[in-house]
Amino acid sequence: MKFVTYQYDGKERAGLLKEDFILDLYEYSNGQLPSDLLSILENYEEYEGKIAELTGEGKSLSSVKLVAPLPKPTSIRDFYAFEEHVKTSRGRRGLDMIPEWYEVPVFYFTNHNAVIGPDDSVYIPSNCHRMDFELEIACIIGKSGKNISIDEADDYILGYTIMNDWSARDIQAHEMKVGLGPSKGKDFATSLGPIIVTKDELEPFRTDKSYDLQMTASVNGKVISNGNFSTIYYSFAQLIAHASKDTMIYPGDVIGSGTVGTGCILELGEETHRWLQDGDVVELTITELGSLRNTVRK
C-alpha cells in the first residue's frame, strides 16, 4: 500500500494512493478510519484489513496538494549508515575513518516539528553560506517496542519514504567543534515524502540486508548524486535494534538512513557543484518511492 497526506478543505487528510488517485481513508471508510495517518499507525493492526478493502475512484492526484505523509512524526532519529558517505566526507576534511563507526551505528535526533513536504520551500538559515541537501531513505515505525532484536526488527517497519536532511554546513562545522550536535546546522528543516510505501511492495527489490533501490539527486534538473540503497553498511534492522535499546520506539517514529554515497555537496565537493542558492530546485528520487522536490529560498 501507498499512503499520503494531502490538503483537503483547509485540513490535512490521510489517503491511500492507488495509481493516480487518492482514497480519503476517513471518507471511504464511512468514518471507521481516522482522518490522520499518525492515528492510523497507532492502531495499524486493527485498521490494516479495513484499509486493504477500500475501493473507489477517489480524488485525482493532480487535483490535490500533497504534504509530508507524516507532518508531525513522533520523533526523527537520523543515522550515519552508509560507509562511502562517511569515508569520503571525512576524507574531504582531512580526517581518517574512525574504527568506532564499525562498532556501533550512531544517530542524532533532529527536529520533528520542522518537517516539510513535497514542493514546499526550504529557507536558508541566517548566516548560512554553505547550504546543502542530503539524499536519504527513511523507514516509518509501525508498532511500539523496546529492546528489539535484529531478527525481529523488520516486523516493526511499516514502510519507507524519501528523506532530505537539509544541512547548513558552515553552521554545523562551527558548532560541532564543541563536541555536541549537530544542532542549529540541522534544526531548520527535514523533508519527507511524497509517499510512504509499505515494505511488502518492495519485496521484489530485496537484497541481503536492504533493497536494490536506485537513489538520485538533481539540482535544477541536473543529476549530481547517484547511489543505491543496497550499499548501506548497517541494515535498518540493526538501526532499529540499536534505537530501541533500553528505550521505547513508537508508531510514527522516523528512522533515517543517513546520506547515501555521493548524496550531498559536502561529499561531492564544490568542484562538482556549488553550495545551494536561492531559487535552486532540489529533487530526490528513489525507485518505487517517487520524487521529493523542494525549492531553496533565502
Image (cartoon, rainbow, N blue to C red):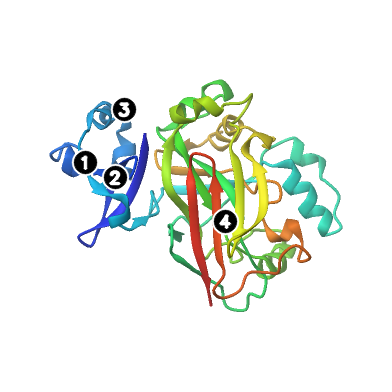
Label 3 or label 1, whichever comes before in sequence order: 3
Q: Which residue is mark 4?
A: 165
Residue at image x 67%, y 58%?
180
Alpha-carbon neighbours of circle 4 within 10 Å: few (<14), some, or many (≥20)?
Answer: many
Report if the CB atoms under discs 2 and 1 are less than 8 Å apart.
yes
Q: Which residue is mark 1?
A: 57
Q: Which residue is mark 2?
A: 21
Relative to 234, is 122 above or below?
below
Q: Secondary structure at mark 1?
A: loop
Q: What is the three-letter code of the residue carrying label 3?
A: Glu
Report if the CB atoms under discs 3 and 1 are less than 8 Å apart.
no
Q: What is the three-letter code of the residue carrying label 4?
A: Asp
- Which quadrant: the N terminus? top left
* Gap between marks 1 and 4 measured at Cα: 35 Å
Q: Position of residue 27 (x, y in %)?
A: 17, 44
Q: Which residue is mark 3?
A: 45
Report if the CB atoms under discs 2 and 3 are less than 8 Å apart.
no
Residue at image x 63%, y 75%?
128
Disc assigned to residue 218: none
Report if the CB atoms under discs 4 and 2 are less than 8 Å apart.
no
* Gap between marks 3 and 1 measured at Cα: 25 Å
**Closer to the observer: label 4 or label 2?**
2
